[in-house]
Image (cartoon, helix red, strand yellow):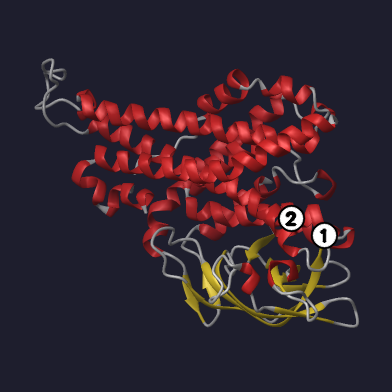
Amino acid sequence: MADYKAPLRDMRFVLNEVFEVAALWAQLPALAESVDAETVEAILEEAGKVTAKSVAPLSREADEEGCHWNDSVVTTPAGFVDAYKTYAEGGWVGVGGNPDFGGMGMPKAVSAQVEEMINSSSLAFGLYPMLTSGACVSINAHASEELKATYLPNMYSGEWAGSMCLTEPHAGTDLGMIRTKAEPQADGSFKVSGTKIFITGGEHDLTENIIHLVLAKLPDAPAGPKGISLFLVPKVLVNADGSLGERNPVFCGSIEHKMGIKASSTCVMNFDEAVGYLVGEPNRGLAAMFTMMNYERLGVGIQGLASGERSYQNAVEYARDRLQGRAATGAQAKDKAADPIIVHADVRRMLLTMKASNEGGRAFSTYVANQLDIAKFSEDPTDRARADGLVALLTPVAKAFLTDLGLETTVHGQQVFGGHGYIREWGQEQLVR
């Protein structure tokens, strides 16, 4: 697999030339005071370095090794712990986080580029900070000030991680059928009991604590989706002084053996009267969780773009090096036994299609990110309402379209490799998966 190089030139072009984000941010007072061109440039440069040097070299071997489960303990592949520490120390988990609790406070248009870089370097690795960032979005939007002050700083710093616990074995996406229960306690907490499946990053060894956002039903909850509440359930309980206390009865029953991203732990999580805290209003948990889900939806679209970018970089390097056949217009590398396959028309068609898809996809995801920034930071209610409407329309489109396009782009890259595209050592079949 080719070395990953962050496409900073293309990112700068989208931000500065296509959307002229500096002019947009100048109209949003909250950003005009905190974001400048030099800071954004430094963020892009440093994110490109950490993803290319610390994370990308792990991707291939981590896919071969996968995650390990032993008696509820999950171990990530070799190198992930050190790489995550490096990533967290750079502040990258909280790049878009609330500055009041230690986040960088960067606009989504910037954090979207960082998300692309981390997912291109290793999609499996990128899922851990992605789920943490998404959980932070929901906590920041809906939790009490006490919960925000207790949990957000350590989550933004990457010392603690986050997860999203929605579906159950019998329910799938029909969340109104969930059976997880939350029993009120005298001290205002709740005892949460139930089983959740397909929980990305539900258990791992990257952080000392994992903060689960769990959908559950109160004893008197109405039937169906209108009876769902949201609870914050830490893996390790937090003492009043902020130090870690006893282990909460939250355990990983197994990890799924899934088709693609093997270095990401997808867990079955069991909650056995685990201590939890209500986030938002009772029976309004689905609305609070959708704040996180919508964040993750755009993030999943960016994952499709990121996979396509990595596939393109691999394919174009291979096409320049692989000698096979002669150009239709005559030999190009006359001193060699054959020409590099990049001279062939169909290879060039595939490479140019990949490049166009990636550049268009990056423009699309950045456009949606800009609308998120307007909806969040604009002081004009009309502009906020219009941006909110566009986000509601385009977020599911971005998730579906960019992942479909990402699959097509990774397959194109596989075809550029020919038979080698199906051999694991070259890395293209990993991207297709």
Mark 2 and mark 1 residues within 8 Å of each other at the beta carbon: yes
Disc 1 marks which residue? 143
Residue under the image location 78 percent in, 63 percent down? 284
- The residue type indicated by label 1 comes to Ala
Q: Nearer the viewer, residue 233 or 283?
A: 283
Residue 392 picture location, percent across and down: 66, 43
Residue 369 picture location, percent across and down: 65, 36
Q: Quadrant of the C terminus?
A: bottom left
Residue 200 lies, with reference to residue 92, above or below; the image says below
Query: From where the camera sits, is residue 31 visible?
Result: yes
Number of residues whose C-alpha sits closer than 10 Å to that of mark 1, classed few (under 14), some (14–19) or many (20 or more): many
Residue under the image location 62 percent in, 35 percent down? 368
Give the farthest residue toward the top: 329
- The residue type indicated by label 2 comes to Ser
Calculate the distance from the C-alpha at mark 2 to the C-alpha at mark 1: 8 Å
Query: From where the camera sits, is residue 157 visible?
Result: no
Residue 23 picture location, percent across and down: 73, 19
Residue under the image location 68 percent in, 55 percent down? 290
Q: Nearer the viewer, residue 422 or 38?
A: 422
Q: Nearer the viewer, residue 79 or 219?
A: 219
Q: Earlier in the sequence, mark 2 or mark 1?
A: 2
Disc 2 marks which residue? 138
Q: Quadrant of the N terminus?
A: top left
Under circle 2, the secondary element is helix
